[in-house]
Image (spheres, rainbow, N blue to C red):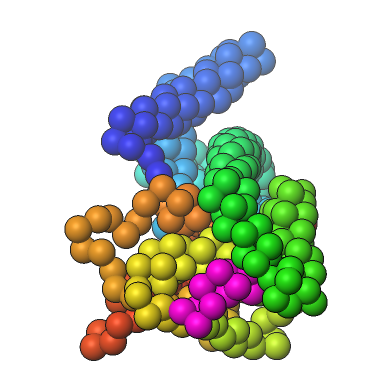
Amino acid sequence: MLTFGKMAKHNKTYWIAQVGGWSFYTLINLIFFELTAKTTKQDYIIYFFVITLGISISHIYRTVLKKLKVVEMNFLYQIITMLISSVFKGAITALIINVILKVIFPGAPISFENLLKDIINFSTVFFVWNIIYFGYHYLVNYKRAEIDNLRLEAAGKESELNSLKAQLNPHFMFNSMNSIRALVDEDPIKAKQAVTQLSNILRNSLLMNKSKEITIKEEMNLVKDYLDLEKIRYEERLSFELSIDPKTEHLMVPPLIIQGQVENAIKHGISKLEQGGKIIVATKLKDSLLLITVTNTGQLNTERSITGLGFNNSLQRLQLMYGKKAEIKIQEIPNTKLVETHIQIPLKTQTKN
């Protein structure tokens, strides 16, 4: 989004290019006519109106382009727009110039051949204007996309690093290993399973930075291993339910986007309750959106912000990857002791890297 200062600078550059470009075009033509034939008063009048009409018509055209957001459309549509609009503007300019010429100089001859030449000439000029305009916006959008990709990569790396630190921090490792050690004598089979789950979490976390997106199924495998390990620690204080729509399993999400919310649900919800609680992870499709909810027993702490660094980082990742329709919201469900984290991702931009 352009700030006021950038907008002012952008508009100043545009008007300099407009006036300078059309003046340069007129000057070149006048020099050409001066070298090939004597320039008349009629020629100066015609090119005065050429500058005025050129600036006016191209500015109106630019306003229409901005309103219709043509520069954001696909390349083929832009090419068609450039061709058709160039001929249309060229024809209008040629007709107006010839009408003005006839009014000022009633005796000046106007032939179909000369009119056609004028249309071709002005259409060519407007086509060059189109190339410059669309080329400029292509470079600007390319630069913006490049910057967004760098921001996305940086945000993704930071988020993955934060999540990895959360999973590899001494407190988590200490609790997990103690829970497994307690199971060795009591339930060796379950202890072996817990070791496998911990190994899966560590391995998958280390591999996450190789992809910007993974499937819901892959993410939920990690979530289940994490919850199973925490279940050993919290025992009856923690129960969970995974309600995953089979139609969503192949859809793509950023790595650890769900696992991070589940981790927050335990840290800020279940662990604070003496009786513990339940976590429900659900996915579903609605229109062109993938909806993910993480619901946990607990209440929001109104004394502290619910949108910390991790939350804002996740939101930034989603919106850089999927646009402004992507979002994360945390809310307390009225008249219940439940907190719900809602993740929304548009389907149309989902691709696997």
Residue sitting at x 37%, y 51%? 308
* Residue 39 spot, x, y in % from top left: 53, 17
Looking at the image, residue 345 lies above or below residue 308: below
* 329, 82: nearer the viewer: 329
Compared across the picture, whether 317 is left or right of 103 comes to: right
For the residue pair 194 and 142, the one nearer the viewer reads as 194
Q: Quadrant of residue 345?
A: bottom right
Q: Position of residue 264 (x, y in %)?
A: 45, 63
Residue 103 in sight in this render: yes
- Give the residue drawn at x 35%, y 56%: 307
Q: Is residue 268 above or below residue 210?
A: below
Residue 210 pos. (x, y %): 77, 49
Of residues 151 and 25, the one nearer the viewer is 151
* Residue at 57% across, 58% down: 175
Looking at this view, name the residue that lies furthest to the front. 185
Q: Is residue 1 left or right of residue 197?
A: left
Q: Residue at x 73, y 71 (%)?
A: 185
Position of 175 relative to 2 (above/below): below
Answer whether residue 45 is visible to the viewer in this image.
no
Left or right of 31? Residue 191 is right
Vertical position of residue 214 compared to residue 295: above or below: above
Look at the magenta stretch and give its main secondary structure: helix
Q: In which quadrant is the N terminus drawn?
A: top left
Residue 335 within the segment the image draws in magenta: no
Magenta region: 227-238
Quadrant housing residue 339: bottom left
The quarter in which the C terminus is drawn is: bottom right
Task: Identify which residue, 217 or 44, lies in the foreground.
Answer: 217
